[in-house]
Image (cartoon, helix red, strand yellow):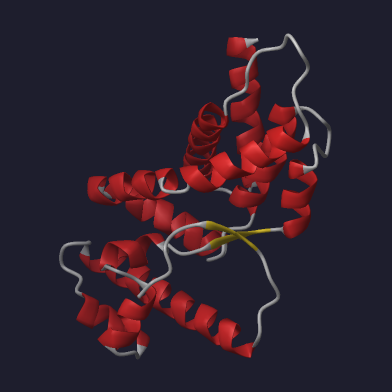
Amino acid sequence: MPTAPTLTVATDDGLRERKKRARRAALIDATHTLVARDGLDAVTVEAICEAAGVSTRTFFNYFESKDDAVLGHGPWPLSPQVVGTFVAGGPTGDLVDDLETVLGEVVAHPPMGHDRFRAALELAAREPRLLAKQIAWVEAHRGAVVRLVADRLESTPQPDGGPVVEPDAVAALALVLVHTAAMRWEAAGDDTDPRDHLHAVVTQLRAIFV
């Protein structure tokens, strides 16, 4: 069965994991090529497997459906250094700035690579079903973000008399920021850094609410 979508702490890969990553990439590439050419509804899992040179059993070891293969859904590792620094109260001590650093790691290092990530977003923009699934996939990470923010708040208590910061609210905002930054980056259609689009969205929110 495919791995449930989650934010994970990155670890060193062995040969077996590198082979699995290469096979996943081949399936994503085959799916993108076929869907771009024939349209989502016309493409079958069998056609994807034939193009990638794998069995349908292998396909379903990586993805639950062709929609998931288009979007490249899978684990999204985070740098343990970035996570550790955030939980400890860094790198700046400002929650919003530090959250932006963590989210920047997310948008800047998609496991499937920038080209596949952009292709997935482009195809999702054409297909309402895919766009809805992508939004739902982002939302599925809420629990991981809530835990991350809760760990940060536990290790770095907020000043007395200040506003109460709720991990659920911060997590909801974080997911909106990631989705918006990714869609802006895809729409730009150039080689800009996704983190620049994230920073622009954060800056706009600061201007609105501060």
Of residue 88 and residue 209, the one placed in the foreground of this image is 88
Q: Position of residue 119 (x, y in %)?
A: 43, 59
Q: Position of residue 25 (x, y in %)?
A: 47, 75
- Residue 186 showing in the rendered view: no
Q: Which residue is drawn at the image coordinates 49% and 32% (left, top)?
A: 172
Give the total of numbered labels: 0
State whether residue 163 is above or below residue 107: above
Q: Which residue is drawn at the image coordinates 51% and 31% (left, top)?
A: 168
State whether residue 55 is above or below residue 78: below
Of residue 177 and residue 139, the one placed in the foreground of this image is 139
**Image quadrant in which the C terminus is located:** top right
Q: Residue 88: which quarter of the image?
A: top right
Q: Residue 157: which quarter of the image?
A: top right
Left or right: 99, with 124 as reference point? right
- Residue 194 showing in the rendered view: yes
Q: Position of residue 126 (x, y in %)?
A: 29, 48
Of residue 91 and residue 112, the one placed in the foreground of this image is 91
**Image quadrant in which the N terminus is located:** bottom left
Of residue 204 and residue 93, the one placed in the foreground of this image is 93
